[in-house]
Amino acid sequence: DSQVNIHGHRIELGEIEYYLQQHSDIHQAVVTQDHNSRQLVGYIQLQTNSHHHNEFDQLEISIFDPIERTNFKLARHGVKRQYIDETSFVLTKPELTERLINSYYQRKTYRQFMNDIVEKSDIEHLLTKCYSNKKNTEHISED
């Protein structure tokens, strides 16, 4: 079994080795799990005609160049997507419902951890007050 479990994700070591070997400067690659640090360790053998071959005389090397590191793209199996691809957005105002009002007040600030239900009468009072202030402002500006 060439699968390992790191931080709750099953990782296929052969797949990582395959993608490492797709790099033009790498001849062979072996990936193992370091059981002490719970990290993956990759050992690579450079091509004899690699432009990096004469730079290193060690058996183990690391790729520090960020451009080369980003060239190793692995599929992210088992990881939830963090975004939703939207093709269109609704530009109309949502209908003011009790559920919408409650959800707004439940998440209005990260400092509050209470899920108090806001009474509809309180919201209606606030909306009426805001609307009347707006009318008074418009009335003053017309004069």
Image: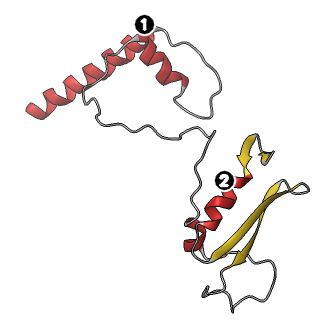
Classed neighbour count for the residue bearing mark 1: other residues with Cα under 10 Å, few (<14), some (14–19), many (≥20): few
Q: Which mark is residue 15?
A: 2
What amino acid does circle 2 point to?
Glu
Left or right: 80 as drawn, with respect to 63: left
Q: Residue at x 15, y 30 (%)?
A: 140
Locate residue 58, reporting x and y percent: 81, 85
Q: Quadrant of residue 49?
A: bottom right
Going from the N terminus, do you reach mark 1 or mark 2 first?
2
Picture layout, residue 16 above or below residue 48: above
Q: Residue furthest left?
A: 143
Locate residue 130, reporting x and y percent: 31, 23
Towards the viewer: 59 or 94: 59
Q: Which mark is residue 121?
A: 1
What amino acid does circle 1 point to?
Ser
Q: Is residue 98 visible?
A: yes
The nearer-to-camera label among 1 and 2 is: 2
Q: Is residue 143 visible?
A: no
Locate residue 133, reporting x and y percent: 27, 24
Left or right: 75 as drawn, with respect to 5: left
Q: Quadrant of residue 30?
A: bottom right
Secondary structure beneath label 1: helix
Picture layout, residue 64 above or below residue 80: below
Secondary structure beneath label 2: helix
Q: Quadrant of the N terminus?
A: top right
